[in-house]
Amino acid sequence: MEFIATFFTHSGAVKYKRHMKSLGIEVELLPVPRRLSSDCGIGAKFTTSADMSKLISDDIDKLFLVEKDGERLVFDSQNQ
């Protein structure tokens, strides 16, 4: 499954990339697509089949699952 994560800060995105690398998941940092919005403008795109609980960190604002019809919100820090 392919995901896009958004973050509160740029440093949070960099920290998340290191965290995911430690789990063996390669992450590409990229500008957040405007339709997804973001506080810091940096997102992380990655593909994994790992359990979703391993993908969530304190640095994430939102996590989207990329589907053929677009992105579906699967985690929102504001609703936790």
Image (cartoon, rainbow, N blue to C red):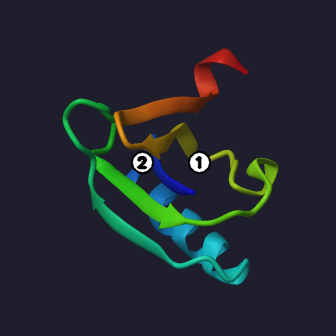
Q: Position of residue 67 (x, y in %)?
A: 44, 42
Location of residue 41 with respect to 76 vertically, above or below: below
Amino acid type, label 2: Thr
State yes or no: discs 1 and 2 in contact (Cβ < 8 Å): yes
Q: Earlier in the sequence, mark 1 or mark 2?
A: 2
Image quadrant containing the N terminus: bottom right
Location of residue 49 with respect to 78 vertically, above or below: below
Q: Position of residue 68 (x, y in %)?
A: 37, 42
Question: Is the residue marked by circle 2 packed among few (<14), some (14-19), or many (20+) residues within 10 Å?
Answer: some
Residue under label 2: 9
In the picture, measured across the screen, residue 22 lies left or right of residue 37, that is: right
Residue drawn at x 46%, y 67% as measured from the top left: 14
Question: Is the residue marked by circle 1 packed among few (<14), some (14-19), or many (20+) residues within 10 Å?
Answer: some
Dot 2 falls on a residue whose secondary structure is loop
Residue drawn at x 78%, y 57% as measured from the top left: 54
In the image, 9 versus 80, the foreground residue is 80
Residue under label 1: 59
Q: Position of residue 44 (x, y in %)?
A: 42, 59
Q: CA distance from mark 1 to mark 2?
A: 8 Å
